[in-house]
Image: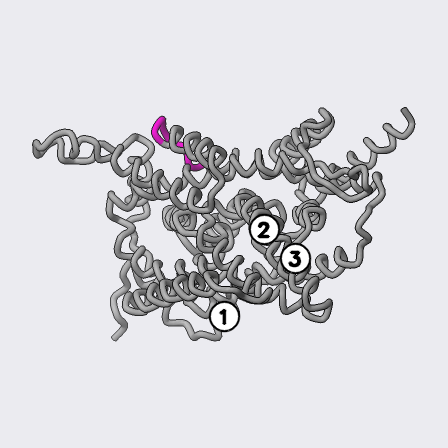
Amino acid sequence: MPLPQTRDAPQLRLQQRSLTARVAETLRHFAPLGFISFGGPGVHVVLLRRRFVDELKWVSSATFNDLLSLGNALPGPGSTQLAFSIALVRNGTVAGLLAFCLWSFPAAIGMTALAAGVRSLPESLPPSVLSTLSGVNAAAVGMIALAAYQLALSSITDGATQLVFLGTAALSLLHSASWVYPACVLSGGLLLLLWDYRGAVLSSSAAEQQPLLSAAHGSLEEQAEAAEEEEHLMTLPPKWGLALVAVFVASVLAVAVVRSRPMGVLAEVFTSMFTAGTIIFGGGPVVIPLLRGYMVSTSLVSSRDFLLGFALLQSFPGPNFAFSCFLGGLAISARLGSACLPLGSALAFVGIFYPGILLKLALLPAYKSWKSLRAVKSMLRGLAPAASGLVLAAVWQLFQVGNLHASPGGHTESGSLASHPFWPIVAAFAFVLVKDWRMPPWLVVALGAAAGALKWKVQQLA
């Protein structure tokens, strides 16, 4: 006699599929993404929502928003964590790890190859090349500004989240220490928790004990209730999650011990990337200025090579965190020889992605239990605008170093894009072309290069 059908039956059938079927489904839908995901995290989120919520319906809109907010609340690459977690809750841990590899490997391999090419370049580059690369940098800054704008639109829902967004941007620009990034994001979550529950703090009456959630927050609850049919999310058992949290804590302590002692270049590259992956909140745009501090200030990578890599990063698909492969390859090959360049890229890749992916894998089981709690929703409501504020701050930081020019001694140096009014206009064009004209980011990067070459040519004729 057949079992009676329930509203949860389709979800249960999904979980009962074989591992082979789940892996094959993940491979089919994620394999192209690593090659077409141009444009950075803001565009990645739109791409993932269109494919896995609107078209394939792997997760509900409410779950997608929760996974996105949870990714913003954790360190590491936001859009990569989102892609990883969508595959995981649909098809399990093995499928999630496969999706992560498919999403990130094309960019990692491309940046490793770019490192090999940059290593062979002479120290002095022609002014025409520097102007062309400055045009690429200006276009990249414009697209990161668009990412900050898009993230702000999705995370600012009322006056409180607006203040968190602007306050986080201001504080991260006032002080650039590494602890500022996680402190700003955590503070944003705590402030919104206090704001939403201000009635419970100010009054002890039973009626006022209920949190005074904003209208926007209420809309999130209504959205969740509209999708009341409980999704059976495939995550690790809670005890496995706790074990992975312990592994993460042990890893952080081990890296701290290694960094407190003299170490070789291999350990220095890995621990620098691990530290960056542990403290970065706000995703790809924020990691660029932080990696500049780690790699350029310690002379592991020259400022010129860093900016050359950044100029070309936006023409690659996939996560901005793959920039670590470029930096790690250059740093280690400079000390140990060209044959060690792939080793450096691999160490940097594992170091920067490991913390965020491990934490997401560990905390997803807890998310299943906590996602309906109002306190958790309030925290997530504050974490998202705080992370968006860090992206806004990153726009200014990158704007200050995007102009490449030759020093009197012939060496390549960096300066502000404000040094010539043409560069801010290029950045503005990039913003508009992607936002309103829906132009693909790789084409905008090419137009930025053409604009830089045109600027040099006009100056030569003047």
**Amino acid, disc 2:** Asn
Residue corresponding to mark 3:
326
Q: Report x, y in % for residue 129.
A: 82, 43
| Residue 255, picture quadrant | bottom left
Residue corresponding to mark 2:
320
- CA gap, disc 3 and disc 1: 30 Å
Q: Is residue 240 above or below residue 321?
A: below
Query: Across the whole image, how many numbered discs are drawn on residues?
Result: 3
Q: Report x, y in % for residue 62.
A: 37, 46
**Amino acid, disc 3:** Phe
Q: Residue at x 38, y 28 (%)?
A: 163
Q: Residue at x 63, y 48 (%)?
A: 38
Viewer-side label of 2, 1: 2
Q: Secondary structure at mark 3?
A: helix
Please tell me the numbered disc located at residue 23: 1
- For the residue pair 154 and 164, the one nearer the viewer reads as 164
Q: Is residue 312 above or below residue 132?
A: below
The span shown in magenta is: 154-160
Q: Residue at x 44, y 37 (%)?
A: 154
Callout 3 environment at 10 Å: few (<14), some (14 to 19), or many (20+)? Answer: many
Q: Earlier in the sequence, mark 3 or mark 2?
A: 2
Callout 1 environment at 10 Å: few (<14), some (14 to 19), or many (20+)? Answer: some
Callout 2 environment at 10 Å: few (<14), some (14 to 19), or many (20+)? Answer: many
Q: Does the CB distance between marks 3 and 2 fall below 8 Å?
A: no
Viewer-side label of 3, 1: 3
Is residue 156 covered in magenta?
yes
- For the residue pair 438 and 186, the one nearer the viewer reads as 186
Q: Is residue 450 above or below residue 458?
A: below
Viewer-side label of 3, 2: 3
Q: Earlier in the sequence, mark 3 or mark 1?
A: 1
